[in-house]
Image (cartoon, rainbow, N blue to C red):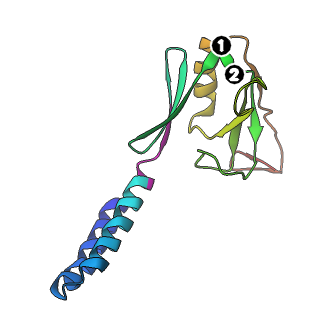
């Protein structure tokens, strides 16, 4: 529904621009529309066989061997990462890799971790489940 609203706004702004032959403005508006559509297509983490892959929109990102993952733990690190939330999982790799960790935010964490452990049973998982007044909407404060 949100994409439809953006599309309607795009069309309603484009018609006067077309009438005034403002083609540069139309190109800028079209690029902005495509960027918005790209952002709405989402980030997906795909486990296929023994590989974990990242896909943002229609672009394939990186892939990593699940057997190389050492541990998974909770992180609220605001560093730029392919994660759509600040409630993230930190995936640690051996130090010999190019990057020693990766931050991701799968929608269904428990199912994601279960799928990772199915491929790599030696995976160390540290996701404390906090209880009490400081627990707000599944966030550990």
Is residue 105 visible in the rendered structure shown here? yes
> Is residue 36 covered in magenta?
no
Percent x, y of residue 87: 69, 46
| Labels 2 & 1 near each other (Cβ < 8 A) | yes
- Per the model, the C-alpha gap separating discs 2 and 1 is 8 Å
Q: Residue at x 83, y 45 (%)?
A: 132
Percent x, y of residue 112: 59, 27
> Is residue 44 covered in magenta?
yes
Q: Earlier in the sequence, mark 2 or mark 1?
A: 2
In the shown orientation, is residue 8 left or right of residue 61? Answer: left
Percent x, y of residue 67: 65, 15
Q: Which residue is mark 2?
A: 69
Q: Nearer the viewer, residue 29 or 3?
A: 29
Which stretch appears magenta? Answer: 39-45
- Residue 93 higher or lower than 30, as above or below: above
Q: Quadrant of residue 14?
A: bottom left
- Element at label 2: loop
Q: Which residue is mark 1?
A: 120
**Image mark for residue 30:** none
In the shown orientation, is residue 140 left or right of residue 62? Answer: right
Q: Quadrant of residue 10?
A: bottom left
In the shown orientation, is residue 25 left or right of residue 15? Answer: right
In the shown orientation, is residue 10 left or right of residue 85? Answer: left
Q: Which numbered mark, 2 or 1, is in the foreground of this view?
A: 2
Is residue 1 visible in the rendered structure shown here? no
- Element at label 1: loop
Q: Nearer the viewer, residue 69 or 4?
A: 69
Residue at the extreme bottom: 20
Q: Residues within 10 Å of mark 2 (few under 14, many from 20)?
A: many
Q: Residue at x 83, y 50 (%)?
A: 133
Quick one: quadrant of the N terminus?
bottom left
Q: Nearer the viewer, residue 79 or 117?
A: 79
């Amino acid at each position: 529904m949100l994409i439809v609203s953006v599309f309607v706004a795009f069309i309603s702004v484009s018609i006067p621009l077309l009438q005034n032959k403002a083609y540069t403005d139309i190109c800028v508006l079209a690029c902005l529309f495509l960027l918005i559509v790209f952002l709405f297509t989402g980030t997906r983490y795909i486990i296929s066989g023994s590989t974990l892959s990242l896909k943002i929109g229609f672009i394939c990102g990186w892939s990593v061997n699940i057997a190389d993952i050492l541990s998974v733990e909770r992180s609220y690190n605001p560093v730029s990462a392919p994660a759509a939330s600040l409630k993230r999982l930190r995936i640690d790799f051996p130090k010999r890799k190019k990057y020693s960790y990766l931050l991701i935010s799968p929608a269904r964490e428990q199912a994601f971790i279960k799928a990772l452990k199915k491929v790599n049973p030696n995976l160390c998982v540290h996701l404390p489940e906090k209880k009490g007044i400081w627990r707000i909407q599944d966030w550990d404060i």
